[in-house]
Image (spheres, rainbow, N blue to C red):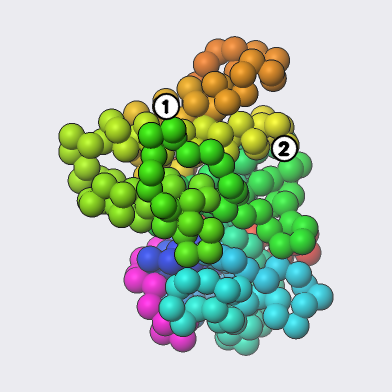
C-alpha cells in the first residue's frame, strides 16, 4: 500500500500526517504557523524517518501560485499573513525528500477529501466553503479541482449585506466582501467578541452573517450548479448558522432553480463536513496520490 505525507497548512496552525486514508494515519502532529522557515522546518523534521513516502500533498492557505509554467509555482501569493508573501512551499519539500509534491489551496484540498471519503462521496460536482479566520471556497468537478486564471476566491465575492448592517467590513482589500462581512475576524470586530463568546448577541450575529452567506451560495448554485455545498470552519459551527444560511440561499434564489434537493429545504444540499477536522488532511492525501500518479 502506498504511503503518503499530508500537510494542512493553515494561517494559524499546520497539521502534518503520514498514512494512506483518513482512517489509516500512522502519525500526526499539529503546531503553530510561525515563519515560513520555522514552520516548514518542523514539517520536514516530522516527515524525516517516517517513510519511505511515495509523495507529499500540501493543502495550503492562499492565495497560491498554482500555474506550473510560472517561475513562482509552489509559492504563496500576496497575503496579509506576515512573512508569508512569496514563501516557497514546494521547493524545500522537494529538496528534502526528492519525491512528488502535490500542491493546492486548503479549500480545494478539503473539497477533494470530502469528495473522496466525506459528505461529497459519490458526487461529481461539489463546493467546499470554510468560514473561519477567512472565508475560502474549493470547487471539485469530476475529481478535478478548479483552476484557471488563478484559483477560486469565493471569500471575496461582492454580495449584498443585511439591510440593517452598517458595519464597514474587515477585508483589507475589499472592505465588505463576503469575508469582510461574515468571517471570524469580521464577526469579532462588529460585535466586540469572538464568535464563540457572543452570548446574547449570537442570534443577531447569525442573522447578519447568514444574509451575505446565503446570497453567496445562491450565486454558486447559479454559476457552478454543484450537487452539494459543504460548509466547514469554526464559524460555521455557530448555533443556527447552517440553517439560517440555507434559508437565506433559498430566499435569494427566489424559486428559480427547480430541484428536488432544494424543495426539501436544502437540508441535504448545504451540509456540514462529514470528516470534521480531518477534511484538510484527507485532501492532502488525495493531492499526494494525484502527484504520485502524475494526475495533478
Residue 214 falls within the magenta-colored stretch: no
**From which residue to which does the magenta span run?**
27-38
**Could you say which is closer to the camera, residue 138 or residue 167?**
167
In this rendering, the answer to whether 252 lies above or below 65 is above
Image x and y of residue 272, in percent: 46, 35
**Residue at 59% across / 12% down in the picture?**
263
What SS does tag 2 mark? helix
Residue 279 higher or lower than 53, as above or below: above
Residue 167 got which mark?
A: none
Give the residue at the far left of this rendering.
199
User: N-terminal of the two: label 1 or label 2?
Assistant: 2
Residue at screen point 72% across, 37% down:
224
Answer with left or right where residue 67 lies relative to residue 181. right
Q: Nearer the viewer, residue 119 or 248?
A: 248
Is residue 43 found left or right of 72 in the rendered image? left
- Residue assigned mark 2: 224
Q: Secondary structure at mark 1?
A: helix
Q: Quadrant of the C terminus?
A: bottom right
Q: Where is residue 194 shown, x and y percent of the image?
A: 26, 51
The image quarter in which residue 114 lies: top right
Q: Position of residue 105 (x, y in %)?
A: 60, 60
Viewer can see residue 213 = no
Which residue is located at x 63 percent, y 62 percent?
Answer: 104
Across and down, in percent, residue 253 comes to: 62, 23
Inter-mark Cα distance, 1 to 2: 22 Å
In front of the other: 153 or 208: 208
Amino acid at each position: 500500500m502506498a504511503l503518503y505525507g499530508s500537510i494542512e497548512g493553515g494561517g494559524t496552525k499546520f497539521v502534518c500526517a503520514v498514512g494512506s486514508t483518513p482512517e489509516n494515519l500512522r502519525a500526526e502532529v499539529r503546531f503553530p504557523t510561525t515563519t515560513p522557515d520555522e514552520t516548514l522546518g518542523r514539517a520536514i523534521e516530522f516527515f524525516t524517518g517516517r517513510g519511505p513516502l511515495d509523495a507529499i500533498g500540501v493543502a495550503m492557505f492562499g492565495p497560491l501560485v498554482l500555474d506550473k509554467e510560472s517561475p513562482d509555482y509552489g509559492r504563496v501569493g500576496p497575503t496579509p499573513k506576515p512573512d508569508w508573501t512569496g514563501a516557497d512551499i514546494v521547493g524545500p519539500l522537494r529538496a528534502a525528500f526528492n519525491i512528488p509534491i502535490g500542491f493546492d489551496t486548503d479549500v480545494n484540498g478539503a473539497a477533494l477529501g470530502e469528495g473522496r471519503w466525506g459528505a461529497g462521496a459519490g458526487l461529481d460536482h461539489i463546493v467546499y466553503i470554510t468560514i473561519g479566520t477567512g472565508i475560502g471556497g474549493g470547487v471539485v468537478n469530476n475529481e478535478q479541482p478548479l483552476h484557471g486564471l488563478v484559483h477560486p476566491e469565493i471569500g471575496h465575492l461582492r454580495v449584498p449585506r443585511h439591510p440593517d448592517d452598517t458595519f464597514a467590513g474587515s477585508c483589507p482589500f475589499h472592505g465588505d466582501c463576503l469575508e469582510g462581512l461574515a468571517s471570524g475576524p469580521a464577526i469579532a470586530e462588529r460585535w466586540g467578541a469572538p464568535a464563540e463568546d457572543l452570548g446574547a448577541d449570537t442570534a443577531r450575529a447569525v442573522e447578519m452573517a447568514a444574509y451575505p452567506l446565503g446570497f453567496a451560495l445562491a450565486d454558486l448554485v447559479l454559476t457552478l450548479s454543484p450537487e452539494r455545498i459543504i460548509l466547514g470552519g469554526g464559524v460555521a459551527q455557530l448555533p443556527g448558522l447552517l440553517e439560517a444560511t440555507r434559508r437565506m440561499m433559498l430566499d435569494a434564489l427566489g424559486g428559480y432553480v427547480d430541484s428536488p434537493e432544494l424543495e426539501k429545504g436544502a437540508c441535504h444540499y448545504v451540509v456540514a463536513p462529514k470528516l470534521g477536522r480531518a477534511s484538510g488532511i484527507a485532501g492532502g492525501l488525495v493531492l499526494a496520490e494525484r502527484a504520485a500518479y502524475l494526475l495533478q
